[in-house]
Amino acid sequence: MLAQRLSGILPPLSFEEAIETSKIFSVAGLLQDSPLVVHCQFRSPHHTISDAGLVGGGHIPKPGEVSLAHNGVLFLDEFPEFRRNVLDLLRQPLEDGRVTIARASIALTYPARFMLVAAMNPCPCGYAGDPIKPCICSPTLIQKYRGRISGPILDRIDLHVEVPAVDYEKLRSEIQAEKSSAVRERVSRARNIQLRRFAGDGVFANAQMKPKQLKTFCRPDSAGQAVLDQAVRQLGLSARAYHRILKVARTIADLEDSRNIATHHLLEAVQYRSLDRRLF
């Protein structure tokens, strides 16, 4: 449910993003009544999907799910159930924002810059850490289950969030929660800040920052740098994880309309790395 709501709180596509997305859907033969795709797409393939279905393929290679989710959300439920060779194909699009499909007679490159959302159980039985129902899985079985996700893929996921079971009292409660429209307003304000920051650079969001932009716009103060130094040493974070923490912290600061990255922004970004390899 949370993954499905995500596309609803994202701001509308810019004209350039809408053109890119519409081209992909046109090539795939999926354009509907409107010739222009103006909303973020939500794609949710089943865990039995093939490598060609995920990244594209065929005699004349057509776009796969990673390209159909361009500028939108790609949701992979039951993440460890996907075949490992299929998941490893996500490395290039997650890193470069595009995917290249090579055949004997032709090689095509499709854009594939998407927001990956993956969901998994804490263990095969699903009750590890549950305060009521006991887990029946052995530590070895849990480690084997979680080990289906390779370190390089996990390293490319910015936010690791544990979602506990919802209490029955909250399920039956009639108290109105915050609406998606209100969240969308905050997200849109933060995205507008980023568009002004990167005007003319062809970058639409903090996640797309290049190293030069990272050094310019993500410079923590001395206290924040000390927090990062400690996190990198104690958690064994990679250089990629370090850069992603800076981008997440910059986004958290944008949501608070803060010009500078404060220490508490960095601390929040660091705590989202809970599933990195040393802790996994």
Image (cartoon, grey):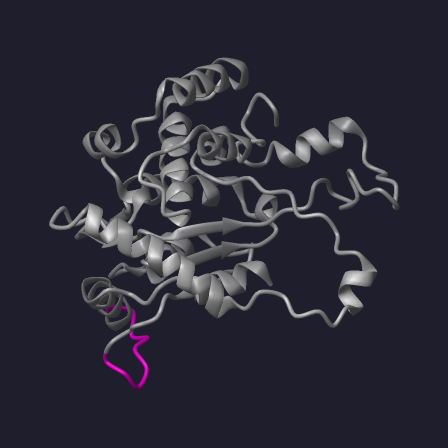
Residue placed most toward the observer, 71 or 265: 265
Residue 145 x %, y %: 67, 36
Q: Is residue 18 above or below residue 54?
A: below
- The part of the image, by quadrant, that contains residue 220 is top left
Q: Is residue 169 left or right of residue 27?
A: right
- The part of the image, by quadrant, that contains residue 128 is top right
What residue sits 27% from the left and 59% below the top? Answer: 61
Residue placed most toward the observer, 229 or 141: 229
Location of the C terminus (image quadrant): top right
What residue sits 55% from the left and 55% below the top? Answer: 48
- The part of the image, by quadrant, that contains residue 138 is top right
Q: Is residue 54 above or below residue 240?
A: below
Magenta highlight range: 27-35
Q: Is residue 28 above or below residue 82?
A: below
Task: Specify whether residue 30 is painted magenta.
Answer: yes
Location of the N terminus (image quadrant): bottom right
Task: Specify whether residue 77 is painted magenta.
Answer: no
Query: Would residue 180 be seen by someone viewing this image from the given angle?
Result: yes
Q: How many marks?
A: 0
Chief SS of the magenta region: loop
Residue 77 x %, y %: 58, 54
Query: Would residue 64 be seen by someone viewing this image from the given angle?
Result: no
What residue sits 45% from the left and 30% below the top? Answer: 266
Residue 275 x %, y %: 58, 32
What residue sits 30% from the left and 27% below the top? Answer: 219
Q: As drawn, which residue projects farthest toward the left? A: 200
Residue placed most toward the observer, 165 or 223: 223
Q: Is residue 45 left or right of residue 173?
A: left
Q: As drawn, which residue projects farthest toward the bottom? A: 33
Residue 32 x %, y %: 32, 82
